[in-house]
Image (tube, coloured by chain):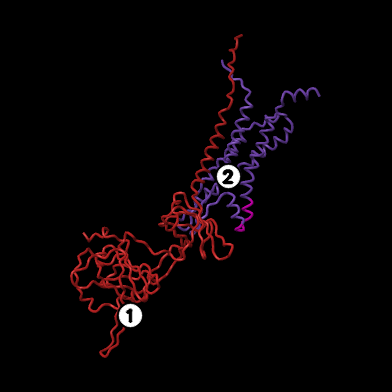
Chain colours: A red, B purple
Amino acid sequence: MKQLDTPKVTRAPALPLVWVVPLLALAIGGWMILREYLNHGPEITIEFASAPGVVPGKTMMEYKGVTVGEVQKVELEKDLKNVLVTVRLNTEAAALACEGTQIWIVHPEFGLSGVSGLDTLVTGAYLAILPGTGPSAKGFKGIDQPPPPLHTDLGRAYFLQSNKLGGITAGSPVKYRDIKVGEVEASQLSDDSTQVVIRVRVYTPYVELVRANAQFWNAGGISVKVGLLGAQINTTSLESILAGGVAFAIPDGEPAPLAQEGTHFALHEDAPKDWATWQPKISGHSPESSPPPSVRKDQIPFLH
Amino acid sequence: MKFLVSDSKPENLSLSAALALAAAIMLVPANFLPVLYTQNGGSIRTDTIFSGIVGLCQAGWWILGVIVFIASILIPLLKLVGLGYLLIAARRGSGAHARPLTRLYVVLNVIGRWSMLDVFLVTFLSGIVQFGVLADAEPRSGIAAFAAAVVLTVLATEAFDPRLLWRQSAATTLNTSVS
């Protein structure tokens, strides 16, 4: 009879290999929760006078057309005067929340000078945000109106002073020889309330036209003159009748130096006499027709 | 000629216990993380398992809500608790109540597969509802954790050897033989 080999006795390892499985589960589960937690940026609260169409868990916050946060809750303040909206920002958008940040609610708007926020017809209202430059902050006061667009890279802004607004609204055209070269951005009363200050922006290709001696006048509406020899009706375009408008011209002779950004001009009630016969020669590359502000000069092929 | 002689039962117990522990760990992200993202005509929501059940009940589908609650929260939890109880009983090795405990094991082995209901629901919705702007559904990470928890529970139950419930410790055997 053959003798059996002596058995080889091995001790079971103190911690069997299977316990790697729960350790792995702990690592993966922990990582999943951590990732979800890290993706949650700061929570900010915004105070609105009213918040129609803002729904918790549904309404988004958008910046440059990208979703950067979600409304968590909407609640009334204790004194019932304001609404507090709490928004959780995404991590990568945390830097948007700083002092001076402006937040407003975007609804569809139908105006004479255009339709805006049309996408909100389908998706519902959303919160728009325009970041400020101060240190980071948590609480904000919402604004009722969207702030005027700041196309700092698109042309130059000038201020016009007038005794009355005269039908000029944001979006009204600014014209040179009846070609649209810019638009009205905003208007407000002057500091001492004696005048109206209108901010206009002239698009980049036309900035050369605005000289220090430019004459601005209100070109909106219709002017009707009835005299012995008949009636005369003056207007520039249908848009100007409905939305108002501003026109300017440069007096004859050697053109004055270029007007700096933010120059103040007087806005006259009527066009200066014979402005159409003024022939100041201003060289510049003007596109064939007035482009929308988003079209840059270098994108128009026939300029070269 | 070589023989591998091993008292294999304790390893079996630890395999089952390890899998059960892993399942219990995965249940945490499964229940706290969102499992489904849905977008319907611009209204966007991300649901955890529980918020989905609340949503179903609020929408008036409360029978459906109860079914999902039982399948996705109650059964996985009860199954793990039951398995834990069996593991402790087997480790003590008293051999007491072996018959009802074995019956419990059979029940646990049968009911677990139900729990994949939520996983099927999410994969089904994500596959079918793809209408771009109008309606869209996407799975979220929680459902992976949930599926992992269910599969680990099934494996832990399979790895458990019910014969261990009948094993009597030396002391118990001695006592019974004396009496």
Which numbered marker is on residue B38? none
Give the magenta-colored segment's residue range.
Answer: B58-66
Circle 2 SS class: helix
**Viewer-proximal residue among A13 and A202:** A202
The residue to which callout 2 is attached is B116
Amino acid residing under circle 1: Ile
Q: Are marks 1 and 2 in contact (CB under 8 Å)?
A: no
The residue to which callout 1 is attached is A222
Residue that protrudes farthest toward the front in the picture: A192
**Viewer-proximal residue among A81 and A177:** A81
Closer mark to the observer between disc 1 and disc 2: 1
**Viewer-proximal residue among A192 and A288:** A192
* Residue A128, horizontal then vertical, whole percent: 44, 59
Amino acid residing under circle 2: Met
* Residue A209, horizontal then vertical, whole percent: 24, 67
* Residue A193, horizontal then vertical, whole percent: 40, 73
- Count the numbered circles shown: 2
**How many C-alpha atoms fall within 10 Å of the one at disc 1: few (<14), some, or many (≥20)?**
some
The answer to whether residue B64 is magenta is yes
Residue A127: tell me if it is visible: yes
